[in-house]
Image (spheres, helix red, strand yellow):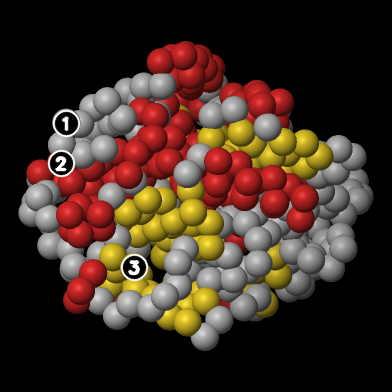
């Protein structure tokens, strides 16, 4: 299919589905385009800075600290509007986006709806082992973490108390490592004087990974440094470990030929992602090709093969035109893709050719905890305090609004010098009596992790 006909007598209608990094950066890149009208559609009314979501889950930051209303971000951009709607379908031939309430026509469509948790065919584990992708996920995980300490304070049975103070994180990618380090800091430092019956230093934090090292996307030397930093913080790291079953308050693991069931009140999932449902919509409606996790395989200019006016960016896109492997699902990729597509659309309107998308690798960062991180900038790799400081600067820089930057800087400074976390609120469900299986009720084996 050829490029859509450009009508010079009316503004070019760009519809962006998704207000994450990719969609927002695409919309903002049209700010000076007088011949373009931009509509951003999202089922939420805010942009969420997901890289810091784990700090909401562990009580360091509040949701508002890392969220910005989309209308506020784009209020000065006269050619942009925001619609809080849920997209349910598209009609690629008629160039219409279909929401639950209306149909919205487009000339160019940019899809940036991201990914969700992937339980590899075990969706029944969701309730027992929540993942971390949304504000609601973070608040639920925060509730589970702090409720576990509260319940342990009241628990007289030593075996049940041990299970209440056991935290298992499945998956040792950046999110898993960040969660494990933050929970360890919480238990061994922040909360150590807050309770009278329990000793929070007896908390057990287990980080499980199916591969042979933590942080698989990083180089082996940085992975080893990250593992050493986690161990220093009291995290027990178990690599080459496969999770075979998860139920309420227990996780079963396999190492080699040996199986063990671990009683744990809090089990968190950080092991995988799958594409949003918009991937299957594009497959059905726009002849898109999907990879094994549902991401849309895109052309070198991030468009669909048969629909050059439909672009897929961010975590939903499978772009493998650089070295044959897909680009990682990180914020800088989405940002650059969003800006590139906006430039490409404007070039088309001016009948100018544009080169294919090239990702400029700005490096990879992962934080383990206070004063500990790993950084890979390509030309140099380092860890420790300097890496942690670089991580802080990068995250402050990429926060969207100035008030978020200021609040987070002040909060981090306060936490650094006091070791206190001001967002340790238990919200949602009331504190109930937690039924935890005793060790005697579970199948045990000699594996020690």
- Name the residue carrying label 1: 196
Of label 1 and label 2, which has the lower sequence position?
2
Calculate the distance from the C-alpha at mark 2 to the C-alpha at mark 3.
Answer: 21 Å
Residue positioned 18% across, 68% down in the render = 437
Q: Is residue 66 above or below residue 217?
A: above
Q: Position of residue 196 (x, y in %)?
A: 16, 31
Residue 138 position by quadrant: top left
- The circle drawn on residue 262 is 3
Calculate the distance from the C-alpha at mark 1 to the C-alpha at mark 2.
Answer: 8 Å
- Tell whether 161 sits left or right of 34: left
- The circle drawn on residue 153 is 2
Q: Is residue 35 above or below residue 3?
A: above
- Tell whether 109 sits left or right of 402: right
Q: Position of residue 26 (x, y in %)?
A: 65, 41
One can see residue 31 in this view: no
| Label 1 close to label 2 by CB (< 8 Å) | yes
Calculate the distance from the C-alpha at mark 3 to the C-alpha at mark 1.
Answer: 26 Å
- Tell whether 267 sits left or right of 344: left
Mark 1 residue element: loop
Task: Give neighbour class at mark 3: few <14, some 14-19, many 20+ (Cα, 10 Å).
Answer: many
Residue positioned 55% across, 41% down in the render = 232
Q: Position of residue 61 (x, y in %)?
A: 40, 29
Quadrant location, the N terminus:
bottom right
Of label 3 and label 1, which has the lower sequence position?
1
Residue 269 position by quadrant: bottom left
């Amino acid at each position: 299919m050829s490029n859509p006909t450009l009508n010079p007598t009316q503004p070019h209608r760009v519809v962006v589905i998704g207000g994450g990094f990719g969609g927002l950066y695409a919309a903002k890149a049209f700010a000076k385009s007088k011949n373009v009208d931009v509509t951003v559609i999202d089922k939420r009314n805010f942009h969420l800075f997901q890289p810091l979501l784990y700090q909401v889950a562990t009580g360091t930051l509040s949701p508002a600290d890392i969220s910005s209303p989309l209308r506020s971000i784009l209020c000065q951009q006269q050619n942009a509007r925001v619609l809080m709607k849920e997209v349910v379908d598209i009609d690629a031939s008629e160039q219409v986006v279909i929401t639950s309430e209306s149909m919205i026509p487009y000339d160019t469509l940019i899809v940036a709806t991201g990914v969700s948790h992937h339980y590899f065919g075990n969706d029944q584990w969701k309730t027992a082992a929540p993942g971390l992708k949304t504000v609601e996920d973070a608040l639920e995980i925060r509730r589970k973490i702090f409720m576990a300490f509260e319940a342990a304070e009241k628990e007289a049975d030593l075996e049940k108390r041990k299970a209440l103070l056991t935290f298992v994180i499945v998956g040792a990618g950046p999110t898993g490592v960040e969660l494990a380090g933050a929970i360890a800091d919480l238990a061994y430092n922040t909360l150590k004087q807050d309770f009278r019956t329990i000793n929070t230093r007896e908390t057990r934090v287990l980080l499980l990974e199916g591969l042979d090292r933590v942080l698989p996307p990083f180089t082996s030397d940085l992975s080893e440094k990250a593992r050493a930093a986690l161990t220093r913080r009291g995290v027990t790291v178990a690599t080459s470990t496969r999770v075979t079953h998860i139920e309420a308050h227990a996780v079963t693991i396999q190492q080699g030929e040996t199986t063990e069931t671990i009683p744990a009140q809090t089990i968190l999932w950080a092991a995988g992602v799958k594409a949003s449902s918009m991937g299957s919509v594009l497959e059905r409606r726009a002849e898109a090709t999907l990879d094994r996790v549902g991401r849309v395989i895109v052309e070198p200019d991030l468009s669909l093969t048969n629909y050059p006016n439909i672009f897929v960016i961010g975590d939903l896109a499978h772009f493998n035109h650089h070295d044959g492997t897909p680009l990682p699902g990180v914020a800088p990729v989405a940002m650059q893709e969003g800006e590139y597509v906006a430039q490409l659309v404007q070039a088309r309107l001016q009948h100018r050719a544009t080169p294919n998308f090239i990702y400029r690798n700005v490096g990879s960062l992962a934080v383990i905890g206070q004063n500990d991180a790993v950084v890979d900038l390509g030309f140099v790799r380092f860890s420790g305090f300097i890496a942690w400081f670089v991580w802080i600067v990068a995250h402050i820089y990429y926060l969207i609004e100035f008030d978020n930057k200021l609040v987070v800087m002040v909060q981090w400074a306060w936490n650094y010098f006091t070791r206190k976390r001001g967002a340790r609120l238990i919200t949602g469900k009331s504190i109930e009596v937690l039924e935890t299986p005793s060790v005697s009720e579970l199948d045990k084996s000699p594996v020690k992790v």
